[in-house]
Image (spheres, rainbow, N blue to C red):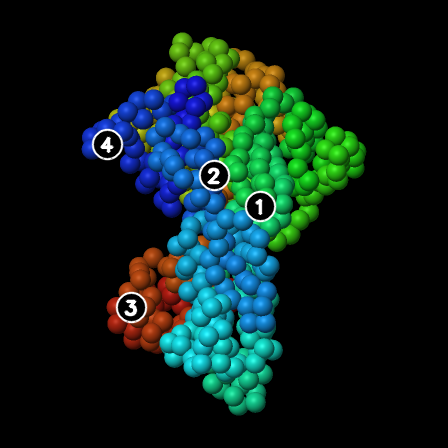
């Protein structure tokens, strides 16, 4: 949470973001500290993470970096804990803090000592590598209690040889490296081999290890051992670009930053990202690796220039796999969310509404706007959408879809007429609020349909605007038809008013397509019995139970159908005709 000057007031994490943020906006019951913070809070920035463990690490890094006044600030800056694996003949596992001077391997860092202890507990149960102190280990003459409860294989007294113990250690390393797939494959092969030689007790041990690994394996996406890199993701919508940069140093995510560069009309994300990398990293320190969600133009030249500036090799990558691909996906998700929030922000909406007021020659900025679109596949599953925007942006609770019926296939005019008639008849009957502006995704024909419907309903206060796609259907070249004013407009591609219209039109298009796909999928999966009037869920259940399935119902004669309780002769004839109408 930030104040009006951009200073960080508070950093927090939440599994349920909506519930957590909503708790700060209660009218009563807030703590004094929270109440004071909310009086200063001007904006909220959000970062999506893969896991809660990652969120905890990121939260801690941000608190240490920004030291927000409303966060708890720890006086002692303890280092992150690691899991340490020693390099002896019979290695031990242990929790470790501080300098890593001992010979062996270190895994982490982990978000807390509790997380390390939980992981060690899992490893102790699964692979039974020792966790005792060396002094304890060297002075044993008989197994300790850990062996009795099956938490150790007792290498201290020779109950397991070095080779078998080394195999348990290798499996432990695979687990800690996050290579769960490879580990599970090895364990599964060992289990099958043990079962083949009828060693079912050993096979059961491998089975339990597989189950344990599958349940608890959790890869640390925040922290790893991959060094320094930046992850860059760029998205563009409605002539606005957002570049999201994640800064990872020494394998730890130090935070992310958003950039909204000003861009020319018709710029695509690839061009924006290429320009951003060149301009930003020639002025700022560059890490050894840059991961981007697009292949950059002149990538080889950028690598050469940035490598010379950094004094070491710098690589640009985009077609990555595994963990890096998931990093990029996370960056894109954050960029899309940030851009949607930016486009829907109140400040941005106010500017666009003022420009729209000027363009449409309205007396005041519109407080409510609606847009309709039609979607179908060659006339199948026709759905009309209605999206609503107000001064704060999309008002999704007021969105509506209309399943269009009883029209000729592919008749968009009839579909638009039916949707508009149903929508505004309902609003007028309920005395609900009408929009000031009605956008229609289409040209003069669709606009003419909208005029007839509103005239029939005697609604005069709505301004109808048709949004027709320009040449080659390219964004930025839309043509606006305003019949009430007798004019046609072609706005500049950089116009904030046009950007708002594009956003509203695109949202109506998305909402219509989603509804159409759902309706089409449902229709293709529906039973023919569902289309017969008078055959409800109970009668369908009786028919299917009586005949053992839909195919047998289709083969049954009228007399057989009539014998089912609740099925009259007329209804039996109707059911029979439904399945035999083509014969």
First in sequence: mark 1 vs mark 2: 2
> Who's the residue at 41% across and 59% down the image?
117
Q: Which dot, 1 or 3, sits closer to the camera?
A: 1
Q: How far apart are marks 1 and 3 (CA)?
A: 69 Å
Which residue lies under the disc numbered 3? 567
Q: Are marks 1 and 3 in contact (CB under 8 Å)?
A: no
> Who's the residue at 33% across and 39% down the image?
20
Question: Which element is circle 1 on?
Answer: loop
> Local crowd at mark 1 within 10 Å, few (<14), some, or many (≥20)?
some
Which residue lies under the disc numbered 2? 61
Q: In this view, does 187 lie above or below 386?
A: below
Percent of width and height locating residue 62: 46, 35
Q: In this view, does 114 lie above or below 132?
A: above
**In the image, farthest residue toward the left:** 29
Which residue lies under the disc numbered 4? 31
> Who's the residue at 42% across and 50% down the image?
112
Q: Distance between the residues labelled 4 and 2?
A: 26 Å
**Pick the front one: 35 or 242:** 35
Q: Distance between the residues labelled 1 and 4?
A: 37 Å
Q: In which quarter of the image is the N terminus?
A: top left
């Amino acid at each position: 949470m930030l104040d009006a000057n951009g200073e960080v007031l508070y950093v927090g994490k939440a599994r349920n973001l909506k519930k957590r943020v909503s708790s700060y906006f209660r009218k009563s019951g807030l703590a004094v500290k929270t109440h004071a913070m909310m009086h200063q809070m001007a904006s909220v920035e959000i970062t999506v993470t893969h896991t809660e463990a990652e969120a905890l690490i990121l939260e801690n890094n941000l608190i240490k970096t920004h030291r927000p006044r409303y966060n708890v600030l720890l006086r002692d800056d303890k280092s992150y804990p690691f899991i340490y694996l020693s390099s002896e003949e019979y290695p031990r596992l242990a929790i470790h803090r501080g300098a890593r001077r001992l010979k062996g391997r270190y895994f982490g860092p982990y978000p807390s000592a509790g997380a390390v202890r939980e992981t060690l507990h899992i490893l102790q149960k699964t692979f039974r590598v020792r966790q005792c102190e060396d002094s304890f280990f060297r002075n044993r003459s008989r197994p300790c209690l850990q062996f009795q409860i099956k938490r150790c294989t007792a290498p201290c007294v020779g109950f397991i040889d070095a080779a078998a113990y080394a195999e348990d250690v290798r499996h432990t390393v695979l687990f800690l490296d996050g290579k769960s797939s490879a580990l599970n494959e090895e364990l599964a092969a060992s289990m099958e081999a043990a079962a083949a030689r009828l060693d079912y007790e050993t096979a059961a041990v491998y089975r339990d290890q597989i189950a344990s690994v599958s349940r608890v394996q959790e890869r640390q996406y925040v922290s790893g051992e991959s060094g320094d890199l930046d992850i860059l993701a760029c998205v563009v919508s409605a002539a606005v670009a957002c570049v999201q940069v994640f800064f990872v140093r020494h394998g730890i995510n130090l935070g992310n930053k958003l950039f909204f560069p000003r861009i020319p009309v018709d710029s695509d994300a690839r061009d924006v990202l290429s320009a951003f990398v060149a301009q930003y990293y020639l002025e700022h320190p560059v890490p050894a690796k840059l991961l981007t969600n697009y292949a950059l133009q002149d990538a080889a030249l950028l690598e050469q220039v940035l490598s010379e500036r950094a004094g070491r090799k710098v690589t640009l990558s985009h077609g990555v796999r595994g963990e890096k691909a998931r990093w990029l996906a996370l960056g894109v998700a954050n960029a899309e969310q940030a851009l949607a929030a930016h486009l829907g922000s109140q400040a941005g909406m106010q500017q666009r509404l003022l420009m729209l007021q000027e363009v449409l020659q309205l007396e005041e900025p519109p407080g409510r706007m609606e847009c309709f679109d039609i979607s179908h596949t060659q006339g199948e599953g026709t759905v009309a959408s209605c999206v609503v925007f107000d001064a704060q942006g999309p008002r999704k609770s007021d969105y509506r879809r209309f399943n269009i019926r009883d029209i000729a296939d592919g008749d968009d005019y009839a579909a638009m007429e039916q949707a508009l008639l149903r929508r505004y008849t309902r609003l007028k009957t309920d005395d609900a609020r009408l929009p000031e502006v009605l956008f229609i995704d289409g040209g003069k024909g669709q606009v003419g349909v909208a005029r007839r419907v509103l005239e029939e309903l005697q609604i005069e206060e709505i301004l109808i605007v048709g949004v027709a796609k320009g040449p080659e259907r390219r964004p930025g070249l839309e043509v606006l038809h305003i019949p009430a004013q007798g004019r046609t407009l072609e706005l500049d591609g950089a116009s904030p008013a046009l950007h708002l219209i594009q956003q509203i039109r695109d949202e109506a298009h998305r909402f219509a397509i989603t509804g159409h796909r759902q309706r089409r999928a449902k229709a293709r999966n529906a039973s023919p019995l569902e289309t017969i009037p008078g055959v409800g869920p109970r009668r369908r259940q009786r028919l299917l139970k009586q005949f053992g399935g839909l195919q047998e119902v289709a083969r049954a004669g009228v007399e057989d159908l009539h014998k089912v309780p609740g099925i009259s002769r007329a209804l039996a004839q109707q059911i029979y005709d439904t399945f035999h109408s083509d014969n």
